[in-house]
Image: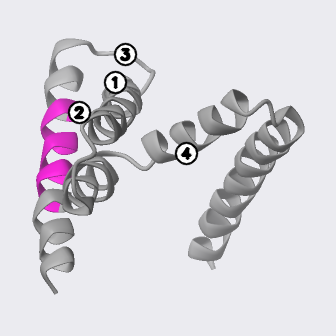
Amino acid sequence: MKNLLIIFVSGGLGSMSRYLVGIWIGDRWQNSLPLGTFTVNIIGCFLISFFIGIIERYNLPREWSLLLVTGFCGGFTTFSSFIYEQSLSLKSQAHFDLVLYLMLSIFTGLTAASLGFELAKK
């Protein structure tokens, strides 16, 4: 139960942070690109790797990972988890797995989104 509470609170903080950063960026740089989302995703990629590095370096208890990685970064962006996992494939030189997963994720994600839009119209 304690672990769920840690994830719940830190995930909420991550989600609120995502919203605030997105609004802040969007208010300052009007563009046809979703720069707020892009910024959040890139910050999330940095943060998840940084947090995991610190947790491993100092051998911190599992609760730190739940707080910072699963909770905060999970609420802030799931893109960071996606990129981190793919960087592990790259690091272990599993190039086929890396390319396959990237292509499947993009193709399947776009297909699922298109299907969702179409079903919502009916």
* Disc 4 secondary structure class: helix
**Which of marks 4 and 2 precedes in the sequence?**
2
User: What amino acid is at disc 3?
Assistant: Asn
User: Which residue type does callout 4 highlight?
Assistant: Phe
Percent from the top left, x then y, of residue 88?
62, 37
Q: CA distance from mark 1 to mark 2?
A: 8 Å
Work out whether 45 lies above or below 121. Answer: above
Q: Residues within 10 Å of mark 1 (few under 14, many from 20)?
A: some
**Callout 2 secondary element:** helix
Displayed quadrant of residue 75:
bottom left
Q: Is residue 34 magenta?
A: no
For label 3, the residue is 31
Residue of label 4: 82
Q: Earlier in the sequence, mark 1 or mark 4?
A: 1
Q: CA distance from mark 3 to mark 1?
A: 13 Å
Q: Mark 1 highlights which residue?
A: 39
Magenta region: which residues? 12-22
Residue at the disc numbered 2: 22
**Label 2, residues with CA under 10 Å away: few <14, some 14-19, many ≥20:** some
Image label count: 4
Q: Nearer the viewer, mark 1 or mark 4?
A: 4
Left or right of 92 on screen, residue 81: left
